[in-house]
Image: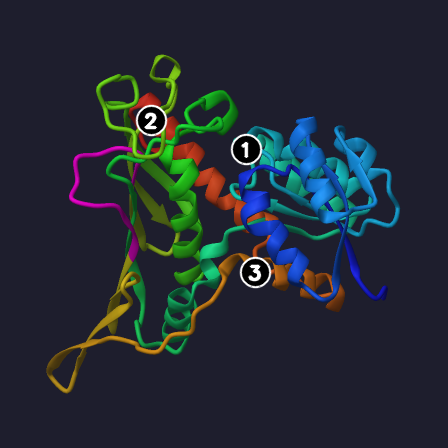
Amino acid sequence: MADKTKIGLIGVGNISQAVHIPALRKHPDVEIVAVCDIREDELNKVADDLGVKYRFENYEDLLKLDEIEAVDICTPNYMHADPTVKALLSGKHVFVEKPIAHTVEQGQAMVDAARKSGKQLMVGYCRRWFAESCALKRFIEAGDMGEVYYAHVQAMRRRGIPGWGVFTQKDKQGGGPLIDIGCHLLDLTFWLMGHPKPVSVSGLTYAKFGHRSDVLGLLGQWDYNNFTVEDFAVGLVRFEDGSSLTVESSFAANIEKDVINTQLMGTEGGCRLDPLKIFREERKTLIDVTPVFLPTVNAYEGELYDFIAALRNGTPVPVTGEEGLIVTKVIEALYKSAAEGREISII
């Protein structure tokens, strides 16, 4: 094995500069050797700061470098699939930001390319690395919740329509809050529940704020004349084992405050993730358990470092392409259910 794992970055926008690059630069066994972006000014700024060997405006040129072992893809949703597939088929491992893609068809092509190439594909669902998430997973795996039969997922912003990027364009993003922030909580909850198989969904979407010029924009001003996504979505997911999940996700809603949370109900206990609290009955007494002194963690470092460790040790990555694809299948089915007004089966 080489002394350092050599990485190429595709996409050097906000998420890349804010979290991916700082995390990778800190890792003692990682070397960023190439960066790529279609925006020449951003590309040169990042490349100069990193002092990398190579910079490219076309990702296919980056993929020609034999010394690169893995690529980290931080492009918008609609630009996940092509570089991922071509990177995998060129013999490189891939870490791709969430969601896996903005359509199931594209996500499936990515998973198929990973299987064909024998290379690893990981999706960036960082909330699994939060200290509260890890602690709760230990309680669940120890049986303290018993049979988990229901989950309630909320990814709700009061006034949080993004005023930058392509977050309000359905053709590029795939949807609104459900695919942008709801996907994080769906992946986390599926993981906490032990990945039950979803079989059908029912969903509704609403666009009550995004088209209006008189709505406060706490995350900047968006183009309300070209707002093509939902600003609120709600859905029910049924699983093969009889358990179920409800999800609510908003960019804008008349609620008291933002809520990013999941709640689980089990036969031996229940829980709320943020702040983490567990609800149980012991010796005919109802008790609430509040964990304390949880460690402070950097979830982005955690996911990227575990990706690197999997590559260097030859072990499976912790968030597989298949798991990422399940989230996108559920989200796409919820959008289809909302559009057609009926329950949608998931194959």
Q: CA distance from mark 1 to mark 2?
A: 16 Å
Q: Residue furthest bottom?
A: 283
Secondary structure under tag 1 reads helix
Q: Quadrant of residue 43?
A: top right
Q: Earlier in the sequence, mark 3 or mark 1?
A: 1
Counting from the top left corner in percent of width and height, residue 335 is at 38, 29
Q: Residue at x 26, y 33 (%)?
A: 252
Determine which residue is flagged by label 3.
301
Q: Is residue 245 above or below residue 138?
A: above
Amino acid on which disc 3 is placed? Glu
Q: Position of residue 226 (x, y in %)?
A: 39, 14
Characterize the local packing of mark 3: few (<14), some (14-19) or many (20 or more) Cα atoms within 10 angstroms. Answer: many
Is residue 224 visible from the viewing direction of this image?
yes
Residue 293 in the figure: left or right of residue 252: right
The residue drawn where x is 74% and y is 69% is 313
Q: Badge 1: few (under 14), some or many (20 or more) residues near its Cα, within 10 Å? A: many
Quick one: 258 or 1, which is closer to the camera? 258
Q: Badge 2 is on which residue?
A: 230
Sequence order check, earlier mark of 2 and 3: 2
Q: Magenta part of the protein: which range?
A: 249-262
| Left or right: where 324 falls relative to 294 | right
Q: Nearer the viewer, mark 2 or mark 3?
A: 3
- In the rendering, which numbered label is found on residue 77? 1
Q: Amino acid at mark 2?
A: Glu
